[in-house]
Amino acid sequence: MKLEKKKGIGAKRRGKKSSIDHDPFLEEETEKRRKFNYDDDDDIESVESEEEVKVGEEVEDEFAHETVGEKRKRLAEDTLNRIEEAKQREHEEDNEEDDDFRDSLVAKTLMQEQLEKSGRVRRANALRVQDLQSSDKFRVIVKHQHSVTGVALSDDDSRGFSVSKDGTILHWDVSSGKSDEYKWPSDEVLKSHGLKFQESWYTRHNKQSLALAVSSDGRYLATGGVDCHVHLWDIRTREHVQAFTGHCGIVSSLCFREGTAELFSGSYDGTLSIWNAEHRTYIESCFGHQSELLSIDALGRERVLSVGRDRTMQLYKVPESTRLIYRASESNFECCCFVNSDEFLSGSDNGSIALWSILKKKPVFIVNNAHHVIADHDSVNHNCTPACSWVSSVAVCRGSELAASGAGNGCVRLWGVESGSSAIQPLYELPLPGFVNSLAFAKSGRFLIAGVGQEPRLGRWGCLKSAQNGVAIHPLRLS
């Protein structure tokens, strides 16, 4: 019985195996495999080869009845067509290269301008200044009744502006010297524009201006002086538009931040105020100086450089509300200006010019007796020998290493500021009698503007009767 059961089980298992062997799915697969199982010696012709044969046959059929002359003509025409197509492709590629070349030049120019504005790249204008000729000298193009206290140029170097101790504000053309005067409005109009009359008799009606600044877009002119107000003018209409109040002392210096309508003002009250000329509003004030603030300067970044009679030069970082303090050891600062975002120049009342770095508390280079009194410029012509050697103004051609300084010793000096070696190299002396109270370079570096007078800008420490009160221009020849 047991053997029969085993046989039955085995039979069943054999039955299952036989069912798998006869699976129709597997049978179809084996048939397919068997169908595509080719021998190694068989030749397989592809579809592409058949098409190529057909195309070749068609070509042969097309030129089957062609004569020898027709064949030569056809081959010559094909050769000419290929040459013309090659020339046309070369011409198109050349045009594309020219377009790319022009686009690259525009991109490089814009990049260079941006780098120069940021101060990371500077033009070598100092090395390009050629030797002065006998015809190259200062020429007075605009005259004032009293000493000129400030000059400025428009962004395109075509127009100039000047203010004087006589209270006049002039707008003049650089090439022709033709000038227009800004008319002060009546007291009622000034009061409606925000002016607050002072109780002091000296400041109540005094329109004496000591500083001015022009916005980069050429829309606004700012002036300030003895009346302790910052006056805003519209350059297009020559009209007074606003009087900013807030300073308790004389407004001694003004400057616009490049590319914006932000205006900075420095005063004898020791504060530095920030205004918006576009919206005609007050923004904030920066404190730090312990005495009168004499000169300020700014570039495109929100940083302001200032010097005061407390023997300090301070760099305000407006967004961070912080400041860096640089101290003079033996003299008072009189003026300052940025060379780039990390370097700046200062002029002192001991006749020295110093180059400073933002990373060091002491000057990296000093030129002593930069404006010593000339032998024939003695006390017969003036009564303030020490004051004549004071460096009353410094200026830098933006985006270059060319700088200038002025005093009352009878000349303006040109300097080359070398950042790599941290040095100041003397270049030329430009004769100009009188107190040079303000300097401005053309953006192109082609000429220099100087505001000159018989008296210093901020006082009456001396008088040079032989000097002219006005604006002088000196051409600069660049190689």
Image: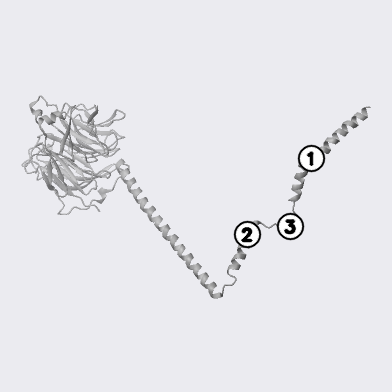
- 46 sits to left or right of 398: right
Coloration of the structure image: one colour
Q: Quadrant of the C terminus?
A: bottom left
Structural crowding at the residue carrying mark 2, measured as other residues with C-alpha within 10 Å and reported as few (<14), some (14–19) or many (≥20):
few
The quarter of the displayed image where residue 111 is located:
top left
The mark that comes first in sequence, 2 or 1, is 1
Q: Amino acid at mark 3?
A: Asp
Secondary structure type for disc 1: loop
Q: Which residue is outermost to the right?
A: 1
Against 29, residue 186 (above or below) is above
Measured as percent of width and height from the top left, residue 149 is found at 14, 38
Q: Identity of the amino acid at label 1?
A: Asp
User: Closest to the observer: 421 or 398?
Assistant: 398
**Residue in view at x 32 percent, y 43 percent:** 114
Q: Is residue 120 left or right of residue 15?
A: left
Residue picked out by circle 3: 42
Q: Earlier in the sequence, mark 3 or mark 2?
A: 3
**Percent from the top left, x then y, of residue 135?**
14, 54
**At x 15% / y 44%, what residue is drawn?**
172
Decide if residue 420 is in sight here.
no
Q: Give the distance between the C-alpha atoms of the residues marked 3 and 1, in whole angstroms.
A: 32 Å
Name the residue type under label 2.
Glu
Residue ID at (61%, 64%): 56
**Mark 2, residue position:** 51
Contact (CB < 8 A) between labels 3 and 2? no
Regarding mark 3 in the picture, which secondary structure is present there?
loop
Mark 2 element type: helix
**Is the Cβ of the residue at disc 2 closer than 8 Å to that at disc 1?**
no
> Looking at the picture, how far across and down is residue 61, in whole percent?
60, 68
Provide the residue designation for mark 1: 23
Front: mark 3 or 1: 1
Are there few (<14), some (14-19), or many (20+) residues within 10 Å of tag 3?
few
